[in-house]
Image: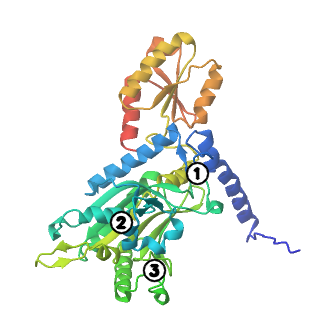
Amino acid sequence: MLTRIYGLAFESEEKLKEYEAMKIEAEKRDHRKLGAEMDIFSFDDDVGAGLPLWLPNGGVLTEELEKLAKETEFLGGYDRVKTPHLAKESMYKTSGHLPYYEDSMYPPMEYDGGKYYLRAMNCPHHHKVFAARPKSYRDLPLRLAEYGTVYRHEKSGELFGLMRVRSLSMNDAHIYCTEEQFADEFRAVNEMYLKYFKIFGVDKYVMRLSTHDPKKLGEKYVDQPELWAKTEKMVRDVLIESNIPFVEVPNEAAFYGPKIDVQVWSAIGREFTLATNQVDFAVPARFGLVYTDKDGTQKTPLCIHRAPLGTHERFIGFLIEHYAGNFPTWLAPLQVAIVPVKDIHVAAAKDLQNKLRSEMIRAEIYDDNNSLGKRIHAAKTLHTPYIIVVGDKEIESGTLSIEKREGSKEANSAEEFIKKISEEIKNRS
């Protein structure tokens, strides 16, 4: 009988202690543990493995992230679209996802004399949106964005909390552009990544440029060697010109073109594959996508697939661990907890809650039958940024007794506090 034994070696006692400390911290930050404690998400056997249910606090996180994406994309000149969650087999055959990707798709449904698949990717749907109306060079670049839900039949043994699921809400968009526009568009996508990194405090990252294997053309990759060489060079040149750190990884490209996977490190040094930025030189032609150029000829656009925030599922899993549940105020499911000292203080607490909620600030009152200490502790369990205690002293003085999440305390009028927290939320600071 053979036994496999694994071991880790460290070059110094200091490195070993750093590793042990990181392991302990990682356990504290485990998104599955914190996600349950903070009522963010849940799984249920009747729903199915790998199909997360967003609880109300998780719903806040997804809404806030989608709001951020929509604002950013609006300023970036994107148009929003909505597409169905399923489509006929013929569309996925045209795109080439069948048979390349069939193992990761749910089995087809037989209906109305044909086969329908739950969508595992949004791009074919967006190609159809592009094709719905004639296009000219004046319409390009055309940027189509959607938080589209996709379904992927991941193997049971590969499912892991929010990091590997079967239902994914993806921050997806497809940019249709000319070859001359490509560098600017690809650069703008990368700059969008950098903006998000700044917002979320991601300091360490690297772009992983995945290229094709010439020996697998026609098998794993579309058989157009000249376009492979050309587009890989285009992507590489943009990364070099932008001074963005990147590494090249062979034989990991998408079947239709080179791609960038964005690797980030959380606050405790754990590595995540967060998002993707892909070039597609093959599939638009399969769908007959064309635009009328200046000289009146019909040309096929290049397509950039991008998802800077990845999916709600993976990104929120990353953020839970990155922040250890201490989300910045704009993102926190509960922004203000109001704790009345006694029953006679509940009316004043409700008045304060109404003032906060009228300014779109998420505030809840903790007025159950537990002691004051237990109610404050319950609010802290949700890592609430601000806890306000309302008692005789506060009502008489007209000031709020505010405890910040990190433990410091201050006193402000309701008006001053609302102004301050509103600015904090607006600026996503």
Where residue 171 appears, x then y in whole percent? 40, 56
Can you say whether 397 is above or below 235 in the image?
above
Where residue 178 appears, x then y in whole percent? 23, 74
Which residue is more in the foreground, 253 or 75?
253
Quadrant holding the C terminus: top left
Query: Which kind of residue does numbered mark 2 sit on?
Result: Pro
Helix, strand or loop at mark 2: helix
Which residue is more in the foreground, 223 or 70?
223
Which residue is disc 1 drawn over? Answer: 321
Disc 2/disc 1 C-alpha distance (Å): 33 Å
Where residue 247 appears, x then y in whole percent? 49, 76
Helix, strand or loop at mark 3: loop
Which residue is disc 2 drawn over? Answer: 124
Quadrant of the image occupied by residue 149: bottom left
Quadrant of the image occupied by residue 13: bottom right
Where residue 148 appears, x then y in whole percent? 40, 55
Can you say whether 77 is above or below 304 in the image?
above
Q: Disc 2, disc 3: CB below 8 Å?
A: no
Which residue is more in the foreground, 287 or 250?
287
Can you say whether 168 is above or below 362 in the image?
below
Quadrant holding the N terminus: bottom right
Which residue is more in the foreground, 90 or 165?
90
- Residue that lies at the very extreme toward the left in this rendered image: 295
Which mark's residue is nearer the viewer, 2 or 1? 2
Drawn side of residue 321 relative to residue 174, left or right: right
Which mark's residue is nearer the viewer, 1 or 3? 3
Circle 2 Cα neighbour tier, 10 Å, few/some/many (<14 / 14–19 / ≥20): many
Query: Which kind of residue does numbered mark 1 sit on?
Result: Glu
Q: Please tell me which of labels 1 and 3 falls first in the chain.
A: 3
The numbered disc on residue 211 is 3
